[in-house]
Amino acid sequence: MKITILDGYTTNAGDISWDPIAAYGQLSVFDHTLPEEISSHAADAEIIVANAVPFDRNAFAVLPNLKFLDIMSTGYNHVDLDAAREFGVAVANVPGYSTDAVAQHTIALLLALTNKVSLHDESVRRGDYFDAEDDCYFLSPLTLLAGKTFGIIGYGNIGKKVGVIAAALGMEVIPYSTDPIGARKADVVSLHCPLTMENRGMINETFIGDMKTGAILINTARGGLVDEKALADALRSGKLSGAGLDVLTVEPPKRENPSPLMGLGNCVITPHNAWMPVETRELLVQIAADNIGSFLAGGLFNRVD
């Protein structure tokens, strides 16, 4: 089988092996592929492995030999499943591989906002501690999480894992969907749901208005869940005390038109890397390979279509 990986760099920058996938056929790997390069990179491919390359009807139309699309991510909202059916292409994803990593990153973002470790580390590195009048000081108030409430939107594998960690910190965990009543109860609201047409922009001015004043929003799910202007306004006004984000609506952001959240002192942003520990990426490659093995054997492992 001719197998092409279209955007391998984020999964493997040279520090792990593609061997589990290469075992199933003749493998070609491209670090990056623009939509207009899909045909030239994979015209003969029977199996394509991709992470974030969008697959609309036009993409399927230029791949006459394609039989199987193996998505190296849990989310597959960037794949037109109707078009895949039309062209007879089976599609699978990789669920569950990043549960521990994303849960860990979720709490890291929360702690970055409540414990201000980077702020005080930078102060010590500047030499401020040498000149301190006392043996301890703080530059911004710290927040104790024990006794606070932690609201989770999307109570799947990641949401439940986050809930376990939050509970271990002494927080009361409240799973709920998009009910503003639940939002008003939470000191921290954390997003762990897939992006759909129905919930796009659900964290909007109205939703935020129903949240507890001074609450924190964490988003390690999808940037499109959040109305970024509404969130930026809430952070500037003090309606929300902070936000920790691993995802933005536009990724990567555009320098000429950046997200309104970038540069805000009470907003911590990481570059969609919650899923990227080396152990997690190795597992991702192995499960993607298992998907191929199942497909070739006539199985339906991790099939979404």
Image: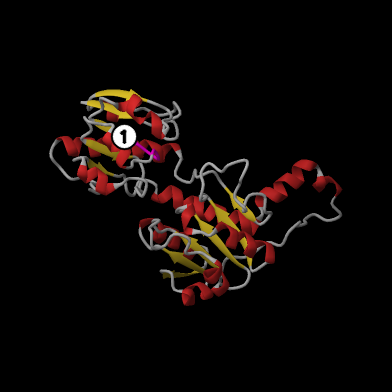
- Residue with the most extreme bottom position: 181
Residue at (45%, 50%) from the top-left corner?
102
* Secondary-structure class at tag 1: strand
Instruction: For residue 102, say whether it is visible.
Output: yes
Indicate how the structure is coloured in the image. secondary structure
Q: Quadrant of residue 141?
A: bottom right
Q: How many marks?
A: 1
Residue 51 is one of the magenta-drawn residues = yes
- Left or right of residue 90, residue 205 in this image: right
Q: Nearer the viewer, residue 305 or 268?
A: 305
Q: Quadrant of residue 14?
A: top left
Position of residue 28 relative to residue 270, above or below, is above
Q: Amino acid at mark 1?
A: Val
In magenta, the rendered stretch is 49-53
Position of residue 139 relative to residue 35, above or below, is below
Query: Label 1 neighbourhood size at 10 Å, few (<14), some (14-19), many (20+)?
Result: many
Q: Position of residue 278 (x, y in %)?
A: 44, 36
Q: Nearer the viewer, residue 4 or 302?
A: 4
Q: Nearer the viewer, residue 33 or 176?
A: 33
Judging by the rendered image, the residue that carries numbered circle 1 is: 49
- Left or right of residue 256, residue 139 in this image: right
Q: Quadrant of the N terminus?
A: top left
Position of residue 36 relative to residue 142, above or below, is above
Instruction: For residue 7, say whether it is visible.
Output: no
Residue 266 is one of the magenta-drawn residues = no
Magenta-colored segment: predominant secondary structure: loop
Q: Position of residue 221 (x, y in %)?
A: 45, 54
